């Protein structure tokens, strides 16, 4: 497997929220979930991170097109994305958002690390002019364009010129090259490693890591006022934030203030060196050059720049729809929901893991998905279970017989496919693991045809029939364990129909390599076929209709939990409002009004009474002495017989009073 400490961390890309996530995103996430489950049943401590990248030009433009704010748009995409991962059966450990402030403060982590690199002298102020692709949110040189267009989005870049903070990427390129020569496995597959090595050898320019023409991002006022963090610098650090970067920076700063301080072994120190990033090949440069260079420059382990850089990246290919990469910008995406609705998550997961050679491009074909589901899951695996349990019902009242002489080919094959699967996962090749495991599936099916138990039964060879049935049940037991990381829901169904105790996910993976472990007289529980056969013509018709419906749904206006922004007003209208700081000096309920409190406030110039609908959220005694913001020049109104001269400001359905962060003089104007 991957390391002697038996610690395994993995991340999906932080998916961009300019549009809903598609089948390509599901593919990356299925792979990470499978690898995590695989390592977990092999005795590893695991930590699986996924999340969302929420800043930048495209997010702001997508939100404006829907008539909502960027955070409203991001909230909707993230809510849908989390629901999608639940339907896909994804069991991640941490979902990080690049807009989040808690439980981990991503904003603070980015600002602290940026300032740390700046203080080390590796970020400087300059000016940049270049060809900028808004789709990629990066600058291109003329030679990187194809026919004058972005090679990814097929659009012409625009010329931008702006002051920027620059990161000395050129300084760290030789160090990265040295690290890749020491450990080529930092970038896989080999073709991607060679690609990056070639680019590093050809020379690397410094990188513009701030923007001044964008306000939707993390401000860098602690370094240079008016600058916002470059979206890729921000997003890449999300992986580290999720792993506890902030806590680790606390440790490092304590040590740097006092070299006698003993660094605590935090989550970050434990998992980060053992974390691999699963990415698509179009974001290879960011993850394999820019990101590790940032971490090197930050010197996260005092005295050793290289010690706390993650384990590296594995870049997979694209899922191709009509020969083109699926892209939200190109508008040719496929939604996972129709497949989930018609097939279930495991069938979709199995197709993507089995059909697509990890690292290469793979085509999406509705008919191929249906055919693979019928051939492998319904026929080979599902029918194997159903036939075996039917024979067991007929010959042994559904109980596992005592074991007899074993089929030695079964014993050898189980050990071989287990070992092959372990090696394939170490090589990040889930497709090869499944190919190997299917040798045992095919052997178990062939064993039925070659042994012909129905003929043995006619001949009265009861012992031979029982020995055959024991081996068949044992094979299914082993297959449930070996296949669990790849099809977790279906293997649990196999486990339950075999009448086995507990849960398949709790079995050690090594149990898939052993033989003769099934307890005789175990009562099996034959049920319906675990994967019904698909009517392909009906499936093709249904999936097309559902895909069209999902396309229309994506084009519909956003459904926001927030109220829409009201019609614009002139500044002169706004200036008429007189906002003042007031101190609450008395508070009591309004008679016969469950929601109203009567407040006496000190406005500096005078004392007055206001009535507010906050009784269900604040106790009168808790408000005494608190400072609030009020609209002081609002015309008086009478509420339940009490005069209210002004209105306090609060936010949300469960109102939170707006207040200054420190005490100020009552009557001060709010500007």
Image: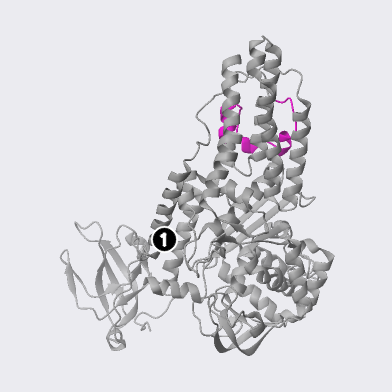
Front in this rendered view, residue 367 or 58: 367
Q: Any magenta on residue 449? A: no
Q: Any magenta on residue 504? A: yes
**Residue 189 x, y percent position in the rendering:** 73, 61
Left or right: where does residue 416 sit relative to residue 636?
Answer: right
The quadrant of the rendering that contains the C terminus is: bottom left
Q: Residues within 10 Å of mark 1 (few under 14, many from 20)?
A: some
Front in this rendered view, residue 75 or 545: 545
**Residue 254 x, y percent position in the rendering:** 71, 68
Examine the rendered structure and indicate whether residue 261 appears above or below residue 570: above
Left or right: where does residue 268 sit relative to residue 622?
Answer: right
Left or right: where does residue 260 sit relative to residue 144?
Answer: right
Mark 1 lies on residue: 551
Q: Residue at x 67, y 49 (%)?
A: 431
Q: Is residue 414 visible?
A: yes
Q: Is residue 659 visible?
A: no
**Residue 430 x, y percent position in the rendering:** 68, 49
Q: Residue at x 62, y 35 (%)?
A: 504
Answer with the quarter of the image where residue 169 lies: bottom right
- Magenta-tinted stretch: 492-517
Answer with the quarter of the image where residue 635 lies: bottom left
Examine the rendered structure and indicate whether residue 4 appears above or below residue 587: above
**Residue 419 x, y percent position in the rendering:** 77, 41
Front in this rendered view, residue 509 or 621: 509
């Amino acid at each position: 497997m991957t390391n002697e400490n038996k610690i395994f961390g993995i991340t999906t890309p932080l998916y961009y929220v300019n549009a809903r996530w598609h089948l390509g995103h599901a593919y990356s996430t299925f792979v990470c979930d499978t690898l995590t489950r695989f390592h977990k049943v092999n005795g590893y401590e695991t930590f699986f991170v996924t999340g969302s990248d929420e800043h930048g030009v495209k997010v702001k433009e997508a939100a404006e097109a829907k008539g909502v704010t960027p955070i409203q748009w991001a909230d909707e995409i993230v809510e849908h994305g989390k629901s999608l991962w639940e339907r896909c059966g994804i069991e991640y450990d941490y979902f990080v958002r690049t807009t989040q402030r808690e439980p981990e403060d991503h904003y603070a982590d980015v600002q602290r690390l940026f300032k740390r690199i700046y203080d080390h002298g590796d970020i400087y102020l300059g000016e940049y002019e270049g060809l900028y692709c808004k789709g990629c949110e990066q600058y291109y040189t003329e030679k990187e364009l194809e026919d004058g267009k972005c090679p990814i989005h097929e659009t012409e870049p625009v010329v931008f010129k702006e002051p920027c903070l620059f990161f000395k990427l050129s300084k760290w390129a030789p160090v990265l090259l040295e690290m890749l020569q020491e450990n080529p496995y930092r970038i896989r597959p080999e073709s991607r490693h060679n690609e990056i090595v070639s680019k590093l050898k050809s020379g690397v320019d410094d990188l513009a890591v701030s923007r001044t023409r964008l306000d939707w991002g993390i401000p860098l006022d602690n370094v240079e006022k008016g600058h916002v963090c470059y979206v890729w610098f921000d997003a890449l650090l999300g992986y580290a934030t999720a792993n506890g970067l902030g806590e680790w920076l606390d440790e490092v700063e304590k040590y740097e203030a006092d070299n006698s301080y003993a660094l605590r072994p935090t989550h970050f120190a434990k998992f980060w060196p053992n974390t691999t990033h699963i990415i698509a090949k179009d974001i290879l440069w960011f993850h394999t050059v820019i990101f590790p260079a940032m971490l090197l420059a930050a010197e996260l382990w005092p005295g050793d720049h290289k010690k706390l850089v993650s384990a590296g990246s594995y870049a997979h290919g694209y899922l191709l729809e009509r020969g083109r990469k699926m892209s939200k910008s190109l508008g040719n995406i496929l939604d996972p929901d129709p497949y989930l609705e018609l097939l279930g998550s495991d069938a979709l997961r199995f197709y993507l893991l089995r059909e697509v050679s990890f690292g290469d491009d793979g085509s999406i074909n509705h008919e191929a998905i249906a055919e693979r589901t019928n051939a492998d899951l319904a026929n080979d695996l599902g029918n194997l279970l159903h036939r075996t349990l039917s024979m067991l019902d007929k010959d042994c009242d559904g109980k596992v017989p005592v074991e007899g002489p074993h089929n030695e080919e079964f014993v050898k094959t189980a050990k071989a496919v287990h070992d092959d699967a372990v090696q394939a996962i170490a090589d990040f090749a889930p497709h090869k693991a499944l190919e190997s495991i299917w040798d045992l599936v095919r052997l178990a099916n062939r064993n039925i045809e070659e042994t012909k138990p129905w003929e043995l039964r006619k001949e009265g060879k009861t012992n031979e029939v029982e020995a055959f049935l024991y081996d068949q049940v044992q094979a299914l037991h082993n297959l449930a364990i070996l296949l669990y990381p790849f099809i977790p829901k279906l293997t649990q169904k196999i486990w339950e129909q075999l009448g086995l105790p507990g849960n398949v996910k709790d079995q050690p993976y090594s149990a898939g390599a052993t033989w003769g472990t099934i307890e005789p007289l175990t009562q099996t529980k034959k049920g319906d076929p675990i994967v019904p056969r698909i009517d392909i013509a009906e499936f093709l018709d249904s999936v097309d209709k559902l895909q069209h419906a999902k396309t229309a749904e994506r084009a519909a206006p956003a459904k926001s939990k927030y109220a829409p922004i009201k019609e614009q007003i002139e500044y002169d209208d706004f200036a008429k409002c007189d906002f003042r700081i007031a101190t609450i000096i008395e508070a009591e309920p309004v008679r016969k009004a469950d929601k109203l409190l009567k407040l006496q406030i000190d406005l500096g110039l005078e004392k007055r009474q206001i009535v507010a609908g906050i009784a269900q959220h604040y106790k009168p005694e808790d408000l005494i002495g608190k400072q609030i913001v009020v609209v002081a020049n609002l015309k008086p109104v009478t509420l339940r017989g009490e005069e209210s001269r002004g209105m306090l400001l609060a936010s949300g359905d469960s109102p939170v009073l707006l207040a200054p962060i420190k005490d100020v003089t009552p009557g001060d104007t709010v500007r």
